[in-house]
Every structure is written in structure tokens, then in C-alpha cells.
């Protein structure tokens, strides 16, 4: 039964510049094999050494990605069209890391295929990347200025499970920047408000609410169940607590802080430095005002939260270069973005060669101020 | 030799509200001395009583932390940029 195979432009140099080739086949694997017999140069383009279809080659049957059908075993019938489209040069997918089995077998619903189509159409993400997102989990510390936009984008992108830690309730003064919360949520716990908004944006996403302060008693237990941690906390004790817990649990930490019109953003990858390498100790209590005291340009938190979400999604997908080993400095008044180098400190008490702190400590005492006093 | 010193928002009140200053000096230490002459008290915000950089402050020459260069002895050249980076807490909740 002849089916028509559409050959993506970069592959046509192997098919005598033919854009369409007819082959006889019962399924996709047979069609691609026949194609490789007829055009031997194509084989190494399509298959790896183990004979698996390369991840940067997307194959469609009648415009549906085969990963959403039956993979290479997808049957084809007379008159069907198979399209073979490799990622364009410059794409991030290198075909080297095999996706866990559960991602291959999880099938997207027709609604999901449409919802995430603008992701999946990009070879760098595709169906495989979208499944990774749906199978991933991210813990967001703080549903405030940074957490609010970050959670919205993570949810829209289809991150399957988002844990949100925040003990606070929505206040009228939050709404100038904490865009996940609405006027009618004033007085309700932020985690509940965030969960409700996410449900309206994307029912695929499970929000796990932790309506509590993150503490030395609960941090490891909460963080251990997540792939990546996004820090949107607004005080030093929590910042050091989250850092140390992520070092101990070897979790990537996407960190940011804002002050008025400025921000600092970076990614700490396990074994490659931590917040204490950057700032070994907090400033003395009262030396650095918080947002309530100094004010904050609301939109800066949106910008920075979106950058954090970008880095989280890149980490989950293994795309591009993470913002690690670098500190991004943002000055929105000058609209100046600069990066400076960050290094792991071999003498770091937590992640150095001979760590002296090997379990969570009393962070209020370390910072000389009770957490609640900063609110 | 004049270098550009970038002062973060949090410290600008200590230097007359300025964000960028042109300061003369052959090393980062000399630049901080010069800055302190013009704005007395600034140095105390950056260095502790032993003259060490405070642990919640980083000082960069261009894109490199001077702790990994020659600390306050790090030479600065015309056109270099010295940036002062203090730890910031804000995630802009009110308390998490």
C-alpha cells in the first residue's frame, strides 16, 4: 500500500532533492526502513546506532506526531501522508538523553495536543518535551511577587505538579504585583488562591498547597518530592534555609531577589556552588529593608518571576544553557541586564570541600532575626 | 585613572543618591578610600572593622568577584567598572 512521505528540507540532500517519496509500508517503521534502503544516506540521519529513531527527528502521520499515536508502530494506510521533519540547526535537542519510559508511554489527550501545540511544534520541545513537563514537579517557595508570575507560567506550560509554600493570606497591598491573586481573594490563604487560579488556567496541573512557613523542621520533607525549587522568598532566614536544604538534597535551585527597581537572578546546580558561596552571611538585621519598607516596582517581580520560570522549564527540558555560574543583574530603570561570574567557594561551610554545616540549623538565630518580624 | 563605580539602590542614599560615580584610584581599595573621602561612612558599609569585605557584600571588577582576584589590592584600569552587590532578601511577598 503506497504512502506518501514528505521529506523535510534539511534531509532532501539525501533524497536526490525529492520532497515527496512514495513507499509501500504497513507502519511508520517499515516506511522509514524502506526509505533508508532506497536512500542509504538517510539511515544515520533518522536512526541512532541502536536503531532508535533520533529524538531530533519528528515524524508525523497525517499531521499528528507519532508519539501521540503508536510511535514507530503507528499503522499507515493507502493514501496516508508521513512527514519526516528534523530539528533545525541551532536547536537544543541533541538526541543523546533517552526519555524515561513513562514519558514515552504517556499519551496526550487531543485537548492537550492542542493546548500545548505551540510548544510541541518546536522540535526542541516536541511531544517528548511536553511529556517531560507534564511529568515534572516544581516547588515554589512563596506565592508572592516572584512566585505569582512564576506559578502562572509554569502552570500554563503544563508543569504537572506545582508545590506552593506560603503561610500568608492575600492582602490588598499584594495585588499591585502578585498577579495570581485577585481582589476577591483578599483574606484567603495565598496557597488556596494560587491553586484556584491555576485550576482556571490549566486543569492538567496539580497544585500542592503548603499553608505553612517553611522551617528547619519541614523543609527537607517538603523539598525532597520535587525536581526543581524556585525561590521567591522575601527574607534571609528562608533564603538560607532553602539553599541549605537544596544542597543537602541535591536539588537545582532557581534563585532571585528584588529590591525596588533592581533584581538579581541565578541558578544553583548541585555541586556547582550555592547561595552561601555568593553571600556567606546575611547582612545585620535592619541593614537591608524589605519590600514593605522600601517599596518594589511591581512589574519587576513579573519580569524576574518569568525569568525564573524560564530557567525552571529549561532545566526540566535540558534545553540551552542554564543561568548557572552567573549572576544576572537587572536594573529596570536603565533597562540594563548584566551578568557577572559566580564560583563555587571550596571553603563554603555547606557545599565546600570540607563542609562544617551538614544539617539544617536555626536560621532565625543565624540571621539574628525572627522570620515573622520581617513581615 | 577613573573607573566607573556602580552603586546598588540599597546604598545610593550613602552616596548622595547617585547610581554611577566616576572615581580615581589604582586599586579597588584606593577607589573605596577615595569614595569614603567624598562620602564619609560609605566604606564602613562595605568593609568590617578589620578592613575585610563584609560577608553580605560582593565587590566586582567588571564581571569578576575581587575575592577571586587580589581583593582590595586588585588593580583597576581606566574604563573598568566596579560594581557593589549586596545580598537582597526581597521576593516581594511580605513574609514567607
Image (cartoon, grey):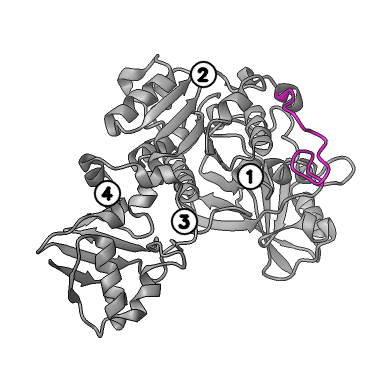
Residue located beneath label 2 in the image:
A167
Between tags 2 and 4, which lies in front? 4
Q: Residue A229: give x, y in percent of width and height.
A: 54, 37
User: Which subunit holds the residue at mark 4?
Assistant: A
Q: Which mark is residue A68?
A: 4
Looking at the rendered image, the disc whose residue lies closer to the viewer, 4 or 3, is 4
Near-viewer residue (B64 or A158) = A158
Is residue B23 rendered magenta in the image? Answer: no
Q: Distance between the Cα atoms at labels 1 and 4?
A: 56 Å
Mark 1 vs mark 4: tell me if same chain: no
Q: Chain of mark 3?
A: A
Mark 1: give few (<14), some (14-19) or many (20+) Cα within 10 Å: some
Residue B31 in view here? no
Residue under the image location 63 percent in, 44 percent down: B12
Query: Dominant secondary structure of the magenta stretch?
Result: loop
In contact (CB < 8 Å): disc 3 and disc 2? no
Q: Which residue is mark 1?
A: B12
Amino acid at each position: 500500500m503506497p504512502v506518501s512521505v514528505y521529506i523535510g528540507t534539511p534531509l532532501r540532500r539525501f533524497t536526490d532533492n525529492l520532497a515527496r517519496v512514495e513507499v509501500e509500508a504497513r507502519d511508520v517503521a517499515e516506511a522509514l526502513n524502506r526509505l533508508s534502503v532506497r536512500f542509504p544516506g538517510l539511515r544515520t540521519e533518522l536512526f541512532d546506532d541502536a536503531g532508535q529513531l533520533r529524538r531530533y527527528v519528528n515524524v508525523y502521520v497525517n499531521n499528528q506526531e507519532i508519539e501521540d499515536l503508536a510511535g514507530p508502530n503507528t499503522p499507515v494506510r493507502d493514501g496516508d501522508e508521513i512527514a519526516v521533519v528534523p530539528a533545525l540547526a541551532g536547536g537544543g535537542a541533541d538526541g543523546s538523553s533517552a526519555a524515561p519510559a513513562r514519558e514515552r508511554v504517556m499519551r496526550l489527550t487531543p485537548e492537550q495536543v492542542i493546548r500545548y501545540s505551540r510548544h510541541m511544534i518546536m522540535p526542541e520541545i516536541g511531544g517528548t518535551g511536553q511529556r517531560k513537563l507534564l511529568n515534572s514537579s516544581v516547588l515554589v517557595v512563596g506565592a508572592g511577587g516572584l512566585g505569582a508570575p512564576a506559578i502562572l507560567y509554569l502552570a500554563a506550560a503544563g508543569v504537572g505538579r506545582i508545590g506552593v509554600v506560603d503561610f500568608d493570606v492575600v492582602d490588598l497591598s499584594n495585588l499591585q504585583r502578585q498577579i495570581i491573586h485577585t481582589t476577591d481573594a483578599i483574606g484567603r490563604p495565598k496557597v488556596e488562591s494560587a491553586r484556584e487560579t491555576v485550576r482556571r488556567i490549566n486543569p492538567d496541573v496539580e497544585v500542592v498547597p503548603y499553608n505553612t512557613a517553611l522551617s528547619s523542621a519541614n523543609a527537607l520533607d517538603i523539598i525532597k518530592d520535587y525536581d526543581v525549587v524556585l525561590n521567591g522568598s522575601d527574607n534571609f532566614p528562608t533564603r538560607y534555609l532553602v539553599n541549605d536544604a537544596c544542597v543537602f538534597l541535591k536539588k537545582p535551585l532557581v534563585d532571585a531577589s528584588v529590591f525596588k527597581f533592581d533584581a538579581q537572578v541565578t541558578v544553583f546546580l548541585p555541586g556547582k556552588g550555592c547561595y552561601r558561596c555568593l553571600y556567606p552571611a546575611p547582612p545585620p538585621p535592619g541593614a537591608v529593608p524589605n519590600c514593605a519598607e522600601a517599596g518594589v516596582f511591581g512589574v519587576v517581580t513579573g519580569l524576574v518571576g518569568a525569568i525564573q520560570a524560564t530557567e525552571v522549564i529549561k532545566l526540566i527540558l535540558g534545553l540551552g544553557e542554564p543561568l548557572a555560574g552567573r549572576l544576572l543583574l537587572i536594573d529596570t530603570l536603565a533597562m540594563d541586564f548584566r551578568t557577572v561570574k559566580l564560583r563555587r567557594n571550596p571553603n563554603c561551610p555547606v557545599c565546600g570541600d570540607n563542609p562544617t554545616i551538614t544539617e539544617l540549623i536555626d536560621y532565625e538565630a543565624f540571621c539574628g532575626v525572627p522570620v515573622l518580624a520581617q513581615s | 585613572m577613573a573607573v566607573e563605580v556602580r552603586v546598588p539602590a540599597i546604598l545610593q542614599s550613602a552616596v548622595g543618591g547617585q547610581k554611577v560615580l566616576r572615581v580615581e584610584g589604582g586599586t579597588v581599595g584606593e577607589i573605596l578610600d577615595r569614595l569614603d573621602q567624598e562620602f564619609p561612612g560609605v566604606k564602613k558599609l562595605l568593609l568590617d572593622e578589620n578592613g575585610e569585605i563584609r560577608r553580605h557584600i560582593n565587590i566586582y571588577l567588571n564581571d569578576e568577584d575581587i575575592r577571586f582576584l587580589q581583593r582590595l589590592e586588585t588593580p583597576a584600569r581606566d574604563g573598568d567598572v566596579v560594581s557593589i552587590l549586596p545580598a537582597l532578601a526581597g521576593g516581594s511577598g511580605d513574609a514567607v
